[in-house]
Image (spheres, grey):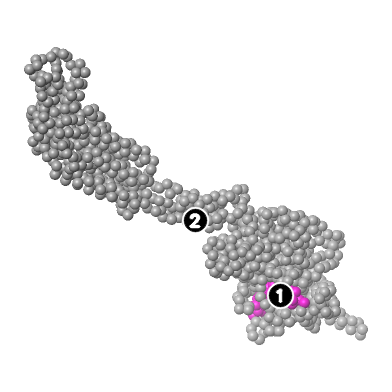
Amino acid sequence: MWLRLLSLVLWAALVQVSQTNVKISPRNAFMDGDVIIGILSSVHSTVDNLQGRVRPEEFTCSNFDQISFVRMLAAIYTIDTINEANFLPGVRLGYAVYDPCADATKALHSVEQMLSTNGSLPVMDDYSEFRPQVKVILGARYSLLTIPVAKLLSVYLFPQISTTSSAVVLSDKLKFPGFFRVIPSDVYQTEALVQLIRHFKWNWVGLVSMDDDYGRGVHQSFLKDAEEAGVCVAYEEVVPHYLGHAESKKRIKEVARKIQLSDAQVVMVILRPELVEMLFEEMIRSNTTRVWIASDVWSRSTDVAKMKDINKVGDILGFSFISGKITGFEQYLQNLPIGPGVRNDFIVEYKQKDCPADSPEVCSKPNADYLVKNTDLPVVYGEWVAIWSIAHALQELLGCNETFCPGDTHFPPFELLDKLHKVNCTLDGKRHFFNKDGDFEDGYDVIMWVPDGEHRRAEVKGSFTIQPREVVVNSHDIIWTSTPNNTVCTNTIQPRRQSLVHLPFHCSYTIPICASLPIQQIPVSRCSPSCNPGSSKKVSNVSCCYSCTPCDEGSYSDRYDEDDCHPCPNDTWSLKGWTRCEPRTVKYLQWSGPYPIALLVGVGVGLLLLIIVFVCFIVYRNTVLIKSANLLMSCFMMVGLAVSFGSVVLFMDEPSIHLCRAQQTMYALGFTLCVSCILVKAFRTFLAFMAFDPVRHHRLNKLYKPLIIMVLATSVQGLVCVFWLIYDTPNVDQTPPSNQSMIHVLQCSEGSSVGFGVMHGYIALLALICFLLAFKGRKVPHDFSETGIIIFSMLIHLFVWLCFIPIYITKNESRPIVQASAILVSNYGIIFCHFLPKCYRAIWGKNTTERIRARLRQFSESKKRASVDSGLSSQDLEMDPGSRRSVSFALPPFTSSESLTDSGFLPTSRHLSLTSASPQSTSPSAEDPSFNLSHADSVFVITAPEVTLL
């Protein structure tokens, strides 16, 4: 009888054990159910004496971690909520919570306990029928623990969901086929961190990380993204991840010293919260402030936020996973109920641990609101989402309807994997699903720790979305504690009121725009000062350390810190250091300009003077003065000068090929015609001088053909112009402007420099011949000849054009004005020397004829003395007092009828007789048109009986 009762008791015990199939260790939590969800929650953060462990004895843990405790409670609360809502009709969810104490080895031990049956873990070749009571595992908190656990679970294709482990390697489905997470991979976190750094124009940062798998993964990913975005790492420091490591404190001090000595004002920190606390203690002790960029591991750590003197470390920015509010969870935390049949050693421990100093309750009963007030509750929203995702997968796997779930709840865990991949549910109005790598793509919240009394609290200041990859920052809502107030926003170009600043991925971002209201200046962390628009970076050995070089001519930069200056588009240009390109100002001699107006006035006055001179010459054509000026040649000179004046007008307005040709051709032919006429006059004067050398005079007189000389001289210039226009015609100058000039001077180029030189050289040659001929005959009386005015006018022309040559060569932009001015001066030189004096004397002069005759007498006497001095033989001079000996020589007569005869002169040359007269000869009367100059005793007398003014 007693044996039967004993056997019944043993059988009942075995049945009970077989129903649970889970061995409950101390400090665990368990609630039975049809489907058990395993939870790995590091309620304690340290395994005691791990380095001194020499026997495989039970692990002992310490350092109660409040946030992990609240995360565990959030998962339990969600399970209870699902059960109460009867989401899985007829199926009750249970849980088994194990504490890995933030240690990978302890985590593996906890997994073994979850998977064990009757205290042992079966070893099989085929785990297709492996059916532990725990069907899915939630956790662990740190990637350091999650990675080895996921490797172990991959043997069984066992589903695992994490709410915080973000290591990039966990997305590898070949290595971790059963791993899921309700957060993005760190590959997105580092991209978001780099974008945030670039958003604030920082490019010189320090990097501190842990030596575990998570820290190494984020470290390498950050370096890669930072390099692509142009962010440089000033230093890289690695800290041991194990809190009890003997070198941890020493290494923290070394890292703190490195941060103090570096000029990088921004530090990226990838550490566990406990290590961050140790680092901040050193910073506070040394009174060092920096801008700290927090990874998701500690960005919402309440323990760090409530450190003593946390406000002294500087500004703290970072990213946290998408958070939210769990309805009813605050009331649950205030009560912490433990239902019947439920075991939760962690709640018991929490209620018995030391109470806060400000708690009025006894130590066995903590303040009911303590967890609510001292925990950042939105961060545990991931547990809510993860458990509900499991519930939706179970609903699909068990084929649940509104009344019951017909599926077998004792299913192999691997069957749940496919249903988790297909989860697509909506919670709190937002859709959630896993991508092909088993990750959520919800993005991140951009947070900033703001002062809250003596502590800090995290506030959401923006977000990062994965599709599209974009940072949105509420710039106007950020208050910097480490910089003074300033109304200038250093990272803007054009201030304008706008609240949100969008920053697309790969740094193709919109420059942040500041409000016009006073804001605080953003801290600066750069290896080199920012290069202003209009310059580019000249990089040294480190890409972020550079000097600023102004953009060269023809290039520009319109943003800060441009790597290279951009070339100007077509038809635009820029000067050195410009921020934009502009069309060059086209400049030419416009009609309304001051210089063109002055030139036009000069042309007008010149043409008016020519008209006056022409009228004067016509009116007084019968006077001796005008007859001596050779009216026909003078008229041709006026025509040439008028054409030359007309060429000046063609220098105005926008040049074209036709204007360029006409400018040079009109001047060349017009002024050559004028100089050819002057050459005729100079030659005539030279013949008059040669009258006392009959032989040479006779020879040269044959060459005196005025019209032929004029036509031939002008025709040669015409041939020069024809060849010039054919072979290399003047055209619009296509030479680009100087790189240092924004003015494009449109002007004519001479085409062939040889043609241009020959044209001017030929005119200069004619002018030089005129000068020499006139200089040779300079002793002929000026009233009788034009030697003085020819000499002076040709000197003016030669001097002007000799000055014109160097100016024309060196002053490229002023060539049209210089050449036009030279033409005017040369023309006015001819007018003032040849025409205006004659007009004045013709109109206002008196006794002109008498003065001419007097000058002739003086000239005759001087020539007679010159003849005697030159050695004429006595035989030639000795003759009878009554005899007369004559020497004939041709002298161009002065007659107004010249224009009616050959070349303007009478067909038959009149003769002057050089006669030896007796002393008794009388001097000719001044009124007598036939005058004789006599001298006693061998005095030569010029008799001109045939010189008659017609």
Nearer to the camera, 814 or 379: 814
Where's the C terminus, which quadrant?
Answer: top left
Q: Is residue 549 visible?
A: yes
The answer to which of marks 2 and 1 sits earlier in the sequence is 1
- Residue 921 placement: quadrant: top left
Q: Amino acid at mark 2?
A: Thr
Residue drawn at point x = 54 percent, y = 52 percent: 536
Residue drawn at point x = 84 percent, y = 76 percent: 352
On screen, residue 608 versus residue 808, left or right, reads: left
Instruction: Give x and y (percent) for residue 165.
Output: 69, 66
On screen, residue 50 versus residue 706, left or right, reads: right
In three-dimensional space, the C-alpha distance between marks 2 and 1, rounded to whole angstroms, equals 50 Å
Instruction: Give x and y (percent) for residue 140.
Output: 73, 68
Residue drawn at point x = 74 percent, y = 74 percent: 375
Q: Is residue 587 inside the magenta stretch?
A: no
Give SS at disc 2.
loop
- Please provide the residue range marked out in magenta: 370-399
Q: In the displayed image of the protein, which residue is found farthest to the top?
A: 875
Q: How crowded is the residue under tag 1: few (<14 C-alpha within 10 Å), some, or many (20+)?
A: many
- Residue 836 placement: quadrant: top left
- Residue 227 placement: quadrant: bottom right
Give the labeled residue for mark 1. Answer: 377
Question: Residue 579 got which mark?
Answer: 2
Q: From what the image shows, is residue 907 above or below residue 21?
A: above
